[in-house]
Image (cartoon, rainbow, N blue to C red):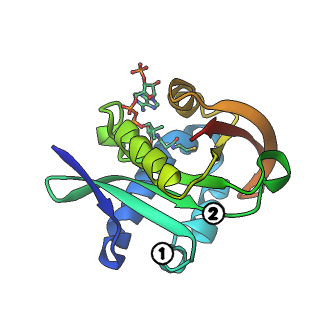
């Protein structure tokens, strides 16, 4: 049985572990070790997680199985796509499932929760960025009805990479 609940400060180390393992599985085969390490140093530290935890206009939901964090999703309100989608948007900024638990509907459970949250916040659109070569995640988002509306460049270590921007009506 997998439960979903809001993250607490003391969950952050377990969330960092899930983010690291899932990112490593997805990205390490296609990127240099150097770029991976730069990315972790800049993004996946407990200090950065703590900072993000206290940012306003964000929500962090965890999937918990037998008391362990097996996935999480981070949502936030911002103005980044205002020109394309208007004011009432929510970004799905991170969605990670522990590699040993992928393909067991935990991502879908978190996505369902994200959609309910977005509806509760009266968002019209939920949107996200996904690496152009992250085909499994793209398949997951396509199943959820997301469609492409643009792209942006994302610096992975020293390597500029393209993220597709995907949107779905709430
Ligand atoms: C993408 C992700 C969040 C999906 O969560 P999940 O719990 O594995 O997905 P679900 O079990 O709810 O849904 C399964 C569907 O997702 C897709 N999928 C994506 N990654 C998958 C994986 N590793 N294993 C199995 N299915 C995966 C498939 O389309 C699958 O449908 P299918 O079985 O009919 O082919 C998760 O696999 C993950 O954390 N991946 C690594 C990190 C990542 O890429 N995050 C997104 C960054 S934008």
Q: Give the position of the C terminus as an image quadrant.
A: top right
Is 85 positioned to the left or the right of 38 in the image?
right
Q: Looking at the picture, tell me which residue is in the foreground, 35 or 85.
A: 85
The residue singled out by tag 1 in the image is: 53
Which residue is located at x 57 percent, y 27 percent?
A: 145
Earlier residue among tags 1 and 2 = 1
- Specify few, some or many for label 1: CA neighbours under 10 Å numbering under 14, 14-19, or 20 or more: some
Q: Where residue 46 sits: x, y (%)? A: 46, 76
Q: Where residue 96 sits: x, y (%)? A: 44, 49
Would residue 115 be visible to someone looking at this image? Answer: yes
Mark 2, ligand 1, within 8 Å: the answer is: no
Which element is circle 2 on? loop
Which label is found at residue 19? none
Q: Looking at the picture, tell me which residue is in the foreground, 163 or 143.
A: 143
Quadrant of the rendered image containing residue 87: bottom right
Total labels drawn: 2
Q: Are marks 1 and 2 in contact (CB under 8 Å)?
A: no
What is the distance, in whole Å, between disc 1 and disc 2 at their CAs? 14 Å
Point out the quarter of the image occupied by ligand 1. Answer: top left
Quadrant of the rendered image containing residue 133: top right
- Specify few, some or many for label 2: CA neighbours under 10 Å numbering under 14, 14-19, or 20 or more: many
Q: Looking at the picture, tell me which residue is in the foreground, 118 or 14.
A: 118
Quadrant of the rendered image containing residue 104: top left
Q: Looking at the picture, tell me which residue is in the foreground, 109 or 122.
A: 122
The residue singled out by tag 2 in the image is: 77
Which element is circle 1 on? helix
Residue 96 versus residue 48 in the image, above or below: above
Q: Give the position of the N terminus as an image quadrant.
A: top left
């Amino acid at each position: 049985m997998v439960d979903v609940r809001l993250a607490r400060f003391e969950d952050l180390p377990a969330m960092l572990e899930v983010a690291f393992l899932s990112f490593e599985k997805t990205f390490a085969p296609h990127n240099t070790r150097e770029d991976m390490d730069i990315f972790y140093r800049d993004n996946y530290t407990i200090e950065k997680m703590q900072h993000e935890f206290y940012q306003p206009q964000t929500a962090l939901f965890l999937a918990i199985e037998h008391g362990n964090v097996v996935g999480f999703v981070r949502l936030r309100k911002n103005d980044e796509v205002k020109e394309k989608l208007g004011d009432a948007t929510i970004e799905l900024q991170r969605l990670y499932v522990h590699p040993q638990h992928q393909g067991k509907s935990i991502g879908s459970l978190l996505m369902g929760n994200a959609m309910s949250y977005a509806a509760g916040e009266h968002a019209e659109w939920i949107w996200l960025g996904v690496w152009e070569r992250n085909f499994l995640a793209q398949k997951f988002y396509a199943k959820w009805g997301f469609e492409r509306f643009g792209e942006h460049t994302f610096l992975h270590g020293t390597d500029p990479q393209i993220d597709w921007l995907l949107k779905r009506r709430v």
